[in-house]
Image (tube, helix red, strand yellow):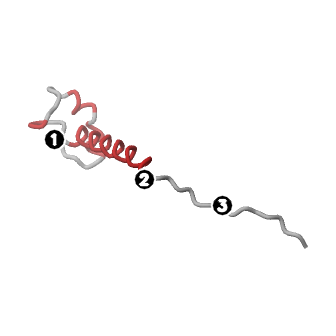
Amino acid sequence: MAQAAVPIPQPLRIPLREVLPWAIFGAVLSLLLLYFVGTEQGAFSVFGGQFVHEFVHDGRHLLGFPCH
């Protein structure tokens, strides 16, 4: 009984130096999004008025940020 030689798949290895810039970019984007949803209001406001607050209003409540 002959068996066919089946290659054993090797684990995918991605070098850290290729992943690190994308991980940093993702972290910065996440923190920026968290800032606009969570704290873009009051003393730390980047944009004046209520436009950003009203734009992310439902997201604030969904994530548990009080705003009223």
Please give the name of the residue rendered at 26% of the width and 37% of the height, measured from the top-left corner: 57
Q: Which amino acid lies under the numbered mark 2 shown in the image of this protein?
A: Leu
| Near-viewer residue (28 or 57) | 28
Q: Which amino acid lies under the numbered mark 3 shown in the image of this protein?
A: Pro
What x and y, as percent, mark residue 27? Answer: 32, 46
Furthest residue toward left: 43
Which residue was labeled with disc 2? 16
In the displayed structure image, the side of residue 37 where residue 16 appears, left or right: right
In the displayed structure image, the side of residue 40 where residue 2 appears, left or right: right
Q: Is residue 61 above or below residue 51?
A: below
Which residue was labeled with disc 1? 68
How many other residues sit within 10 Å of disc 1, few (<14), some (14-19) or many (≥20)? Answer: few
Q: Is residue 8 above or below residue 57?
A: below
In the displayed structure image, the side of residue 19 where residue 61 appears, left or right: left
Q: Secondary structure at mark 2?
A: helix
What x and y, as percent, mark residue 24? Answer: 34, 46
Q: CA distance from mark 3 to mark 2?
A: 21 Å
Q: CA distance from mark 1 to mark 2?
A: 44 Å
Please give the name of the residue rendered at 16% of the width and 31% of the height, measured from the top-left corner: 46
Q: Which amino acid lies under the numbered mark 1 shown in the image of this protein?
A: His
Name the quadrant containing residue 29.
top left
| Near-viewer residue (58 or 26) | 26
From the image, which quarter does the C terminus lie in?
top left
Image marks 3 and 2: residues in contact by CB distance under 8 Å? no
What x and y, as percent, mark residue 21? Answer: 37, 44
Judge depth for marks 3 and 1 and give the one in front.
3
Q: Secondary structure at mark 3?
A: loop
| Near-viewer residue (52 or 24) | 24
Image marks 1 and 2: residues in contact by CB distance under 8 Å? no
Judge depth for marks 1 and 2 and give the one in front.
2
Which residue was labeled with disc 3? 9
Furthest residue toward right: 1
